[in-house]
Amino acid sequence: MPPQAPPPTKANKLYFFYGHRKPSQNRPTVHGGLFSNRQTINPNKPKFSEVQPFNIHKWDPQLVAQSPSLSAPPSKSLSPETSFSISLRLSPISRFIVDAFRKNQNKWGPLVVTELNKLRRVPPNLVAEVLKVQTNPAVASKFFHWAGKQKGYKHNFASYNAFAYCLNRNNQFRAADQLPELMDSQGKPPSEKQFEILIRMHSDANRGLRVYYVYEKMKKFGVKPRVFLYNRIMDALVKTGYLDLALSVYDDFREAGLVEESVTFMILIKGFCKAGRIDEMLEVLGQMRANLCKPDVFAYTAMIRVLIPEGNLDGCLRVWEEMRRDQVEPDVMAYATLITGLCKAGRVEKGYEFFKKMKEKGHLIDRAIYGSLVQSFVADGKVGLACDLLKDLMDSGYRADLGIYNSLIEGLCNVDQVEKAYKLFQITVQEGLEPNFESVKPILVSYAEEKRIEEFCRLLRQMEMLGSQVTDDLSIFFSFLVGNNKGTAIALEVFVDLKLKGYCSVAIYNILMGSLHKIGKVKKALSLFDEMKGSMFEPDSSTYSIVVTCYVDIGEIEEACACYNKIIELSSIPSVAAYIGLTKGLCKIGEIDAAMMLVRDCLANVTSGPMEFKYTLTILHACRSNNAEKVIEVLNEMMHQGCPPDDVIYSAIISGMCKHGSIEEARKVFSSLRERKLLTEANTIVYDEILIEHMKKKTADLVLSGLKFFGLESKLKAKGCKLLSK
């Protein structure tokens, strides 16, 4: 049979297209004209529109980021460099979405929706990719819900999880906890993985109660956790101090028929150790032995580490006995943890016993153990044993660190062995340990007490050669010296000699003046101030603050006010003690208005103002009602807080009642204080006189203000001149 010829091909049909297509959601507007497959009719015809359709494949995020005309101001949360570097890690469409947010300053609106509608479809994987880098929770929520409204779209677990991470990353963890309900309402019941993500977020942030809240929500949704997730929940609750809630979760664990792992037992054991419930801890330890295995040395070391910060050393020793009972051989870490804890708690003898057991067993003893024992023996005054440990340390092949030498130097100085302490200091220099001021401070104190100024200055010069800032170190030295009994007198004697050798500073003057004021030698402190003004050193705000309190103590309020003004001229803030002292001084001389202004100034400039100043403003506000009972309520509250009324409070009552109330209501307040024996009868009379004088002053000020307002001040002056002439 001869082969048949192929069917004839259909000829290309010529067609003409007029106008443009009707646009749809997935197809942008396409403008057209009269076309054919042969030639273009009227080639010189201008284009219908210059607006080009958007093409995602031609979109370049680098061009947008570099072009100032196409890019909008960067968002407040990310700099342009940061947002651009993040966008480079995304897919092209995700970069387009992120750039749409950025161009609109990370604010959701019609412009963002218009940009997103240019895309044909945003699948769940792109939603998750965008949410992973989003820093604005409001925009992330709007975008998440916009994506869910796409036709035929359903969120998957990846998009839900990315949304949860985004909310938690921006501290919107409460909103993230509502995602299981959102998933359930959208036909996607949450699995254990979604709850695990929320629990891990709260656990990492130490939000124990939120972990328990998510766990309760798991039970409502009927999701049963695995052993791993149960352990995670109980561990988070134990770490945040909610042991009882952890035990309730453990009860649910048992009811679910799950079998404990070693991690489960150790979480409960650590929780009981932290709470100091040793007997219950031993019960759980027995269950662990019976049902699973004996704890190893690492588990026992972990128990000791939990007990030591809580100060439960008896519990540590009981755990150690349990370790011996299980025939678990302690390692170096277990010994070091126990010995260090005993030394810090002051039980160095017990720690030394374990140290000797370590040596008997041939363990390699860490230098930190030697340091803890040396420091504890020095604190107990057993410097000989501490020196023996130093010799043992060096015989073992170790090199002592600077902390051990500093402890021994301090101990030797405490037992009047300054020469040996100085030799140890020389050893630290020879070994290149770079001794600091803590190394020489005990020696300097001993030299100062023994008035050995030449050796004192020699040591200072040596520290200068080693690169120390001697002037700053001397400030610390004098602060330490004046803190001891009879240290101020020694400090003054040393200061006189050091001043001649050039070792002096404003800080040292301030320390000495503050110490002299504290022990009541105000005139001596003021003499130092006069000496300082006559020298090359300029007083600073701290100096003037100390001097203010000194002048107030001797009753020279005007001088104190002058020093206060000096502080203001220096653009500084006085100390709280200066504010309190000057305010009380002004109250004593009847300058109540100036005192109230100081109170307001103090509370405006100081972070934590005195309690009496805060109640002063409360009393002034209560006086506006012209009701003595409300003022008395404030006074009762103040005394309940442990702040008894003083001159400032009494002046506040006078000021408030004279400005907003009446003399009668003020007298009721003072009478109440007199009946409760908070005011003596003499002081009541004094404050009543101050009240009357202040009211007269306020009345005169009001009259004068009225005359100035009506322009009658000149007539009053003229009338006064006539009366004087008569």
Image: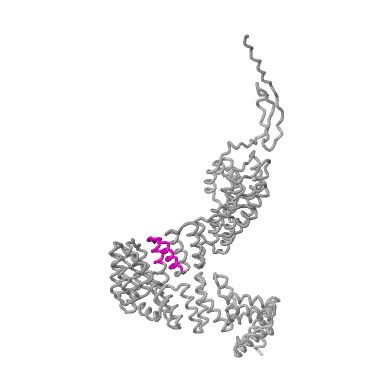
**Which secondary structure class fits the magenta region best?**
helix
Q: Is residue 360 above or below residue 139?
A: below
Q: In x, y percent, where is residue 530? A: 43, 79
Front in this rendered view, residue 468 or 497: 468
Front in this rendered view, residue 185 or 516: 185
Residue 493 lies within the magenta run? no
Q: In x, y percent, where is residue 478? A: 39, 75
Q: Is residue 657 above or below residue 249?
A: below
Q: In x, y percent, where is residue 600? A: 59, 73
Q: In x, y percent, where is residue 640? A: 60, 78
- Assign the C terminus to one quadrant of the image: bottom right
Residue 334 lies within the magenta run? yes
- Find the magenta span and give its range: 315-340
Camera sees residue 688: no
Residue placed furthest toward the front: 290
Residue placed furthest toward the top: 1
